[in-house]
Amino acid sequence: MERLFVIKVGGNIIDDEGKLKSFLTSVASVKSHKIVVHGGGKIATTIGNKLDIESKYINGRRITDSDTIDLVTMVYGGLINKKIVAQLQALNCNAIGLTGADGNIIPAKKRPPLGDGGVDFGWVGDLNSSKFNVQSLMLLLQNNFTPIFASLTHDGQGHILNTNADTIASSIAVALSAYYDVRLIYCFEKKGVLENVEDENSVITNINKEKYKQLLDEQKLFAGILPKIDNAFAAIDAGVQEVLIGDADDLIQNTTDKTTGTLITQ
Amino acid sequence: MERLFVIKVGGNIIDDEGKLKSFLTSVASVKSHKIVVHGGGKIATTIGNKLDIESKYINGRRITDSDTIDLVTMVYGGLINKKIVAQLQALNCNAIGLTGADGNIIPAKKRPPLGDGGVDFGWVGDLNSSKFNVQSLMLLLQNNFTPIFASLTHDGQGHILNTNADTIASSIAVALSAYYDVRLIYCFEKKGVLENVEDENSVITNINKEKYKQLLDEQKLFAGILPKIDNAFAAIDAGVQEVLIGDADDLIQNTTDKTTGTLITQ
C-alpha cells in the first residue's frame, strides 16, 4: 500500500506566522500522499470579540450557537484554510482547501442534547468514519492534490457543523487505513510523550499497548497526555497503522523511519 | 461535446435567504455539468463595518488593502461559499467550494499600480484564462462534482487576491470552451436585456453581433447594460459558445433550448 500521512496541526502553530510558514515548508517537502487537518487559533476569538460574539459555555462545555458557527465557518473555513492553501501553492504543493461539506467527504450528525439536563451543544458534529466519502478523497489524493481540511463538517441538511480537529484527523486516518499505509501525526508543543515532563529530552520513542500498560503502572506519564494516547490507541484499534505525537518542527523527520517523536503502534 | 453551464450569481441573490434557496434548488436540478461563481453581498460590508474595516476608494476605484483581503477571504471564501456548498449538498448536488488558489485552478497576477499616479489597487488579481489549470477543473467535473467558486484567486506567491466574479465566470467559460459546449449564464435582476427598460416584458431574446449593431444604432438599450453585452461578446470571441443574461428565477428555463432571458451568440 502507498504511504499516507494525516497531519493534525493546532492553534499554537496557526497563530504564529513564522511557525506556520516553517510547518508548511515541511508539509510541502513530504513526497508521499498527505492530508492536513487544522483547527482555529486565537484569531477566531479575536475576530469573535470584535463581532461581539461571546464564547458560551454550559457546564464547562463550549456551545456552538448560530453566530459562533458562522464565525468559525468564516475564520477556519475561509481565512485560515485559504491562507494555508495559498502558502502551500507557493511552495509547489497542490493544496486544495476543504471542509467536510465539500464533496460531502465528511458527513456528520448534529450532536443530540446531552444527559438529563439536555444541554444542547448547538451546531456541533459527531462523526462516523464508515460514512466518509472515501472515494472522493482518494480521487483527490491519487491526482496529487493535498487536501487541507478545516475542522468543519455538515449535517446533510444544509448546516455546517463545528467538529473537533483531532477527531476529524483520526477519523480520516481510520477511513483511509484500508487503502493506504497511514501514519496519523499529531503536531504537539513538545518533542513527544515525555517520560519526565520536566525533561524535554526524555521522549519515549515507541509506545505499544504493553509498554503503555507498564508506563501507567509506573505512574510516570503526565495526566494531560493520557487522553491523547487513548485516542491514538482507539485509532489503531480501528485500523490506523501508526500514530505519531511530535513537535511540528520535527515533521520532516517524523515522516521517515527515524522518528524523533513518540510512535504509537499496536 | 458535453454541455457545461457556468453560472454567475451576485449579491442581490446571496443576501436574500429565500432567493438564494430558490436559486440553489434550480442549480441542483440542472442535470448537465455546472459551475457556480459567486461574489459577496452586503454581508461582507456589514461584517467589515463591525471589524472597523473601512471600504477605501481612490478615484472612485475600490482598494483591497490587507484587512480587506482578509475580510473577503473570510466572508466570500468561508461563510458564503460553505453555506452554498452545505445547502447544495442537502439538495443532492455534489458541490465542492473553491477559490482560485485551491488546486491552483485560477492563478492570477496582482494588478500593477495604474497610470501615472500609480494608484495601487492592493490585493486585486487579474486573470489570463490560458493559465487556468483546466485539467484539475475537468477532473472535478468529470467526477460529478459541482465546483462553487468564490471570487478569489491567488498570486502563486502565497497571497489571496480579490477578483471580479463576472471576470472569473467568463474566464472559466473561455478556458473550458475547447472541451465543453459552454453556456455562460449571468443571473441578473431583470428577465434579460430589455428593449424598453420600463417594460419587463420587452426582453430581447436573441442578440448576435448584427442585431447588437442595429440596437446600438437605434439607441434603444439602457447604457448600464452595454458593458455586460460587450463582456459577453468578448467571451464569445474568445471561444464561449453562448452567453445568457437572465433572471435567477428563470435559471431552469434558461438552461434549456427555450430560454426566456437574452441569449447572446456570435
Image (cartoon, coloured by chain):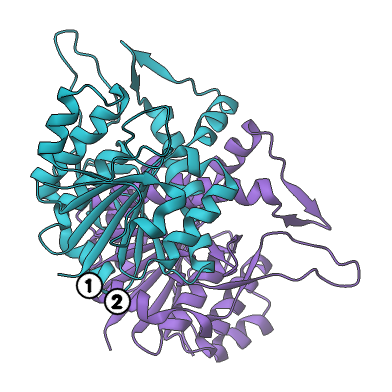
Chain colours: A purple, B cyan
Q: Residue at x 51, y 68 (%)?
A: B91
Viewport quadrant of the N terminus of chain A: bottom left
The residue under label 2 is which amino acid type? Leu
In the displayed structure image, the side of residue A62 where residue B13 appears, left or right: left
SS for callout 2: helix
Q: Position of residue B200 (x, y in %)?
A: 43, 36
Identify whether A120 is placed above or below B65.
below
Residue found at the very far right of the displayed protein: A116
Task: List the residue tagged with mark 1.
Answer: A143
Q: Position of residue B35 (x, y in %)?
A: 32, 58
Q: Residue at x 61, y 68 (%)?
A: A225
Task: List the residue tagged with mark 2.
Answer: A139
- Closer to the camera in the image, A23 or B113: B113
SS for callout 1: loop
- Closer to the camera in the image, B252 or A108: B252
Identify whether B225 is placed above or below A194.
above
Q: Residue at x 48, y 79 (%)?
A: A132
Label 2: chain?
A: A
In the displayed structure image, the side of residue A56 where residue B191 appears, left or right: left
Identify whether A3 is placed above or below B132.
below
The residue under label 1 is which amino acid type? Asn
Residue found at the very far top of the displayed protein: B117
